[in-house]
Image (cartoon, rainbow, N blue to C red):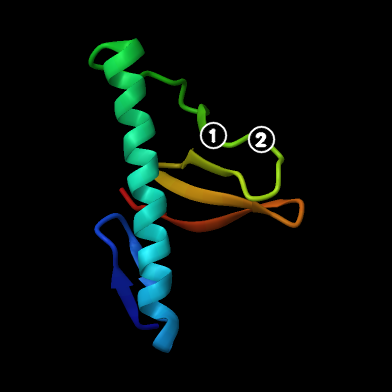
Amino acid sequence: MNTTTNGYFPLPAYGDSGQAKLSEYNAIMEQIDGVIKQLVDGHFGDNIQLPDNGVVYIGEDGVEGSWRIKRSGNDLQFQRYEGGLWIAKGGVTA
């Protein structure tokens, strides 16, 4: 499978729509970066700690269009809630 990267994780190639998808993911990741920076700067000092099974939600759990970041084994997964399921959209492999 052909892939491209957006600086966070590889994405499947989408032909002519690939750049649009890449831009969409970049925009989402910039929003996530901003939220995490605000949390760290405003509330937690230098560190945020979650248990191994902790999840970071952007939006609400179980609400259509919400995002979450979670640990899966030694990897991180970025998931979006679509049609009643959390769908993996990418991630970081250890």
Report the residue that reaches farthest toward the right.
Answer: 84
What residue is shown at x 75% (from left), y 57% (from top)? 83
Q: Which residue is mark 1?
A: 57
Q: Could you tell me the amino acid type at mark 1?
A: Tyr
**Which quadrant of the figure contains the N terminus?**
bottom left
What residue is shown at x 26% (from left), y 11% (from top)? 45
x and y percentages locating residue 8 in the rendered image: 29, 54
x and y percentages locating residue 37 in the rendered image: 29, 28
Q: Nearer the viewer, residue 64 or 50?
A: 64
Numbered tag placed on residue 86 in the rendering: none
Q: Are marks 1 and 2 in contact (CB under 8 Å)?
A: yes
Numbered tag placed on residue 61 in the rendering: 2
Q: Nearer the viewer, residue 20 or 76?
A: 20
x and y percentages locating residue 34 in the rendered image: 33, 36
Q: Secondary structure at mark 1?
A: strand
The answer to which image quadrant residue 39 occupies is: top left
**61 with respect to 89 (left or right):** right
x and y percentages locating residue 32 in the rendered image: 39, 40
